[in-house]
Image: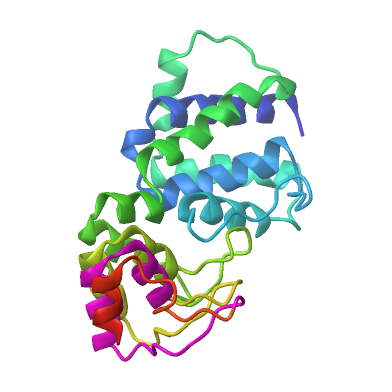
């Protein structure tokens, strides 16, 4: 990689950092992956384990970077510049006009790499955030990017249905249950179902929804407790009996 090509790469990185609002989410994700591959190289899963599916943005970035594992750092630098040129051909003229002509070495790109991380992170919230907020529309948008809605998160041992039921977000839960292929009786790593969570927290609307979608009341968790056994109070028990 020639010094001229490195300078062009750094110029492109500076341009994207200053004009990130001009690019869409998919474009920023591609820039991110090429930048990571160019400045760090192949992703090491031991140092950078795959994020939880609850953290959709982090997971998307991880997958995008990992998809370039066969690409050399030099190739990634070229692809980074090429992508910018394809999207915005005029960038080089604008950058050269505005640049102070200062040189940036290949080895001092960590701070810029951090900034590119922040561009994507700050632009979007995780699906957990939208569940907490009860933001149904944003929740719907992110649902479309999840391949397996019944997937159990390795870190927490929970699936989305457990998380939603625990939070008591009935509108979110109704939206989720209306999706195809949802296992309403899915058990977490300790054998609890969504009905266990809703019952133990006293979320009556969620309990009603789960029952309407056919949730079973006789499933036992790892401690041999049913949703009735863990009920928040007597009123909840009456609902389930």
Quarter of the figure that contains the N terminus: top right
Residue 90 placement: quadrant: top left
**Residue drawn at x 56%, y 39% as measured from the top left:** 81
Can residue 129 be seen here? The reply is yes
> What is the x, y in percent for residue 39?
70, 35
On the picture, is 47 further left or further right than 203? right
**In the image shown, does 132 or 6 lie closer to the viewer?**
132
- Quarter of the figure with residue 16: top left
Residue in the image at 68% along x and 28% along y: 6
User: Can you say whether 49 is above or below 101 in the image?
Assistant: below
* Picture quarter with the C terminus: bottom left
Q: Which residues are magenta?
A: 194-223
Horizontally, residue 7 falls left or right of residue 143, namely: right
Residue at x-position 61% and y-position 39%: 35
Could you tell me which residue is drawn at 47 percent across and 41 percent down?
84
Q: How many marks?
A: 0
**Where's residue 135, x and y in %?**
23, 55
Q: Position of residue 31 (x, y in %)?
A: 52, 44
User: Does 146 appear in magenta?
Assistant: no
Place of residue 175 in the rendered image (x, y in percent of width and height, measured from the top left)? 25, 73
* Residue 105 image-quadrant placement: top right
């Amino acid at each position: 990689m020639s010094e001229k090509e490195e300078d062009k790469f750094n110029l492109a990185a500076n341009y994207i950092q200053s004009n990130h609002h001009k690019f869409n989410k998919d474009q920023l994700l591609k820039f991110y992956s090429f930048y990571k591959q160019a400045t760090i190289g192949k992703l090491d899963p031991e140092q950078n384990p795959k994020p939880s599916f609850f953290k959709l943005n982090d997971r998307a970035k991880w997958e995008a970077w990992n998809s370039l594992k066969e690409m050399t750092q030099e190739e990634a630098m070229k692809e980074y510049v090429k992508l910018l040129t394809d999207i915005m051909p005029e960038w080089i003229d604008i950058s050269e006009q505005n640049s102070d002509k200062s040189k940036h070495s290949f080895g001092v790109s960590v701070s810029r790499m951090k900034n590119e991380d922040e561009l994507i992170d700050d632009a979007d919230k995780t699906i957990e955030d939208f569940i907490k907020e009860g933001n149904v529309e944003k929740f719907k948008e992110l649902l479309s990017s999840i391949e397996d809605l019944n997937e159990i998160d390795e870190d927490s041992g929970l699936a989305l249905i457990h998380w939603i039921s625990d939070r008591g977000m009935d509108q979110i839960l109704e939206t989720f249950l209306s999706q195809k292929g949802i296992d309403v009786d899915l058990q977490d790593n300790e054998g609890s179902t969504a009905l266990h969570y809703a019952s133990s927290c006293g979320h009556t609307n969620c309990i009603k929804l789960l029952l309407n979608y056919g949730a079973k009341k006789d499933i036992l968790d790892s401690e041999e407790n049913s949703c009735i056994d863990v009920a928040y109070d007597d009123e909840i028990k009456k609902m389930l009996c």
